[in-house]
């Protein structure tokens, strides 16, 4: 089944649609203010980071049924799926990275960023098991060990960081910023 999903922040819903026809299949009630949305292939679930309820909604991608909630206790921004099967999401208002199990929906770890605040972008390198966290307050890109949450580096970036990405082939980290600057790190 080929379904697409969008988060509808002002409606507190997720729209499920047919990818071939773009026809709306259904609207699904989720937490308040759904923002970021992502799919985990292993659990076959779609997740939304809900800012109004400070949690994450889990949806069965085949049926569109709401299957549970992750107690994030923060406003999730960007998420990555790690080699260990956990999903890591940066919590913008608590300045931490939270790891949860996409099957059980149990929070496994909470890692304080410490040297910067307001994380927005998050990227991951499976080879080194490192997280790259773009933060707005202190305008830094933080490098963190995903295994234990230890911060190993912090580098200056542009202001208004929004998203981060990692290209494994070139071993390059990208951070986009509201000031129009694109930072690249190798």
Image (spheres, rainbow, N blue to C red):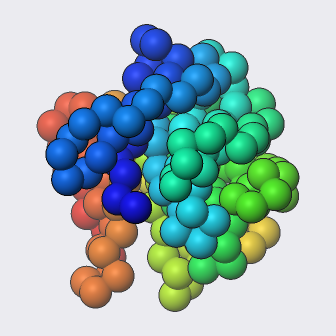
Which residue is nearer to you in this view: 57 or 110? 57
Taking 85 as reference, is 53 above or below it?
above
Is 161 rendered above or below residue 150?
Answer: above
Q: Is residue 24 visible?
A: yes
Give the number of marks: 0
Would residue 15 appear left or right of 131 to someone viewing this image?
A: left
In this rendering, position of residue 9 left or right of residue 129: left
Q: Residue at x 25, y 84 (%)?
A: 170
Quarter of the figure that contains the C terminus? bottom left
Residue 6: x %, y % from top left: 37, 36
Position of the N terminus, as image quadrant, is: bottom left
Q: Is residue 147 left or right of residue 5?
A: right
Position above or below: 32 against 86: above
Where residue 117 sits: x, y (%)? 58, 35
Q: Position of residue 127 (x, y in %)?
A: 52, 87
Snapshot quadrant of residue 173 = bottom left
Residue at 63% from the left image edge and 65% from the top image edge: 43
Look at 67% across and 49% down and name the residue there: 97
Residue toward you, 128 or 78: 78
Q: Position of residue 138 (x, y in %)?
A: 49, 36
User: Residue 105 versus residue 100: which sits nearer the camera?
Assistant: 105
Whether residue 93 is visible here, answered yes or no, is no
Residue drawn at x 31%, y 52% as measured from the top left = 175
């Amino acid at each position: 089944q080929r379904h697409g999903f969008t988060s509808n922040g002002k409606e507190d819903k997720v729209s499920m649609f047919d990818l071939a026809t773009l026809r709306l299949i259904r609207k699904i009630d989720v937490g308040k203010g759904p923002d970021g949305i992502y799919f985990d292939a292993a659990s076959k679930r779609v997740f939304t980071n809900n800012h109004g309820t400070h949690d994450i909604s889990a949806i069965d991608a085949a049926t569109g049924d709401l299957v549970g909630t992750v107690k994030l206790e923060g406003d999730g921004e960007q998420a990555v799926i790690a080699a260990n099967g956990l999903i890591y999401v940066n919590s913008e208002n608590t300045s931490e990275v939270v790891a949860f199990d996409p099957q059980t929906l149990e929070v496994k770890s909470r890692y304080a960023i410490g040297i910067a605040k307001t994380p927005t972008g998050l990227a991951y390198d499976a080879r080194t098991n490192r997280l790259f966290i773009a933060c707005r307050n202190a305008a830094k890109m933080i490098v963190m060990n995903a295994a234990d949450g230890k911060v190993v580096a912090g580098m200056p970036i542009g202001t208004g960081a929004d998203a981060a990405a990692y290209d494994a082939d070139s071993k390059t980290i990208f951070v986009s910023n509201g000031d129009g600057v694109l930072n690249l790190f190798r």
